[in-house]
Image (cartoon, helix red, strand yellow):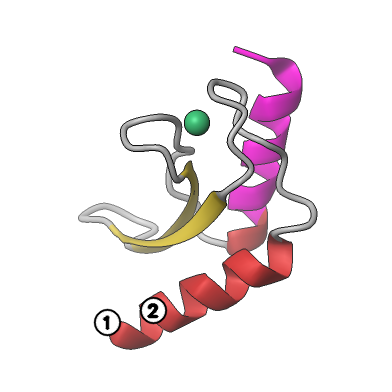
Amino acid sequence: MAKRFEKAKHFTEKYKSILMPCKYCGNTDIRIVSERTIFPPKDGWSVCCSTHNCDTTRTYPSVKAAVEAWNRRAENGK
Ligand SMILES: [Zn+2]
């Protein structure tokens, strides 16, 4: 568990420069989060805005997919 938090922090640092600001609140403090889900992918990743209850992607099997999804959403607006 703790390891997953470490990994999430590591990935947040790694992808920080390419993560786009939140499309809702303009926040640039975007986090990569490790997710455990009941259904596959089970061990997945999502990207979320650090503002409470703001924006989040769904869970993806890879960090890269989650990052791409976040940026796609940010670009498209809405
Ligand atoms: Zn936000």
Query: In the image, residue 68 lies at what x, y percent?
Result: 70, 45
Residue density around tag 2, few if under 14, some if 14–19, many if 20 or more, within 10 Å: few
The circle drawn on residue 63 is none
Where does the N terminus fall, quadrant-wise?
Answer: bottom left
Identity of the residue furthest to the bottom in this view? 3
Identity of the residue furthest to the left in this view? 38
Between 71 and 23, which is closer to the camera in this rendering? Answer: 23
| Quadrant hosting residue 54 | top left
Where does the C terminus fall, quadrant-wise?
Answer: top right
Q: Is residue 51 left or right of residue 9?
A: left
Query: In the image, residue 36 lies at what x, y percent?
Result: 28, 62
19 in relation to 37, above or below: above
The circle drawn on residue 4 is 2
Tag 1 and tag 2, C-beta contact below 8 Å: yes
Alpha-carbon span between mark 1 and mark 2: 5 Å
Query: In the image, residue 20 lies at what x, y percent?
Result: 72, 40
Query: In the image, residue 72 lies at what x, y percent?
Result: 71, 31
Q: Is residue 36 left or right of residue 58?
A: left
Identity of the residue furthest to the top in this view? 78
Say which residue label 1 marks: 1
Between 32 and 65, which is closer to the camera in this rendering? Answer: 32
Is 75 in the magenta? Answer: yes
| Residue drawn at 59 percent across, 65 percent down | 12
Element carrying mark 1: loop
Q: Which residues are magenta?
A: 65-78
| Residue drawn at 38 percent across, 76 percent down | 5
| Residue drawn at 71 percent across, 62 percent down | 15
Main secondary-structure element of the magenta-colored stretch: helix
Q: Is residue 46 left or right of residue 70?
A: left
